[in-house]
Amino acid sequence: MLDKSLHNDKVTQKKKLNSSIIELEEGTSLNLQFEKRGGLLPVAVQETSTGQLLMIASINEEAFAKTLRTRKATFWSTSRNQLWTKGETSGDILQVDNILIDCDQDALVYQVTLLGSGVCHTYDQQSKHRKACFYRELNLESSKLQFIKGME
């Protein structure tokens, strides 16, 4: 009798787990999995009009809530250990147009309109902030970095 009871408990737990996974992956409830990754989730930032990948950053729950409230991309700075709203000091604001959530609800894509010239802290040959942090590519033959045309 005890074995059957344990079996039934395991079956019930498995059904609940499967139900949770189905809701997470197929449902319409937002349940970002901050606890899975130590409180931070990765966010890819993509320009809405071009599809260009601009940067990768991290968010915590507070940064995400501020982004939703203001529609300005706010991140968690891992180097400064504080909230960081892109453009507060540079003027290069990222207006959030849409947010994509992955299947496990543990990674996001912010689709944005760049209100300014660039998001990167580095400068191009004209001494302007680069539009994107991804301005080099790896040559797969030589394993050397090379600048992407137009992003020098």
Image: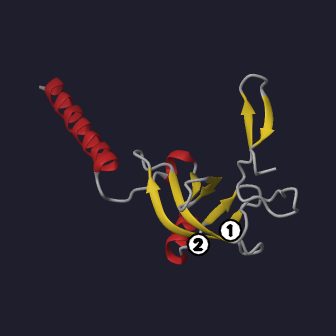
Is residue 50 or residue 44 the one in the foreground?
A: 50
Q: Residue 109 in the image: x percent, y percent?
A: 52, 54
Q: Classify mark 2: helix, strand or loop.
A: loop
- In front of the other: 108 or 51: 51
Q: 1 or 79, which is in the foreground?
A: 79
Label 1: state its secondary structure. Answer: loop
The residue type indicated by label 1 comes to Lys
Q: Residue 3: x and y, percent?
A: 17, 24
Residue 103 falls left or right of residue 76: left
Residue at horizontal 56%, vertical 57%? 50
Which quadrant holds residue 47?
bottom right
Q: Nearer the viewer, residue 24 or 113?
A: 113
Circle 1 residue:
86
* Sooner in the amino-acid sequence: mark 2 or mark 1: 2
Identify the residue at image location x=71%, y=26%: 140
Residue at x-position 30% and y-position 57%? 28
Which amino acid type corresponds to the residue marked 2 in the rendered image? Lys
Residue indicated by mark 2 = 72
Q: Is residue 98 visible?
A: yes
Is residue 56 in sight in this rendering? no
- Label pair 2/1, CB-CB below 8 angstroms: yes
Q: Could you tell whether 13 is left or right of 108 in the image?
A: left
Image-based side of 96 in relation to 85, left or right:
left
Which residue corresponds to the image point at 16% horizontal and 31% vertical from the top-left? 5
Q: Position of residue 117 (x, y in %)?
A: 73, 68
Percent x, y for residue 75?
63, 63
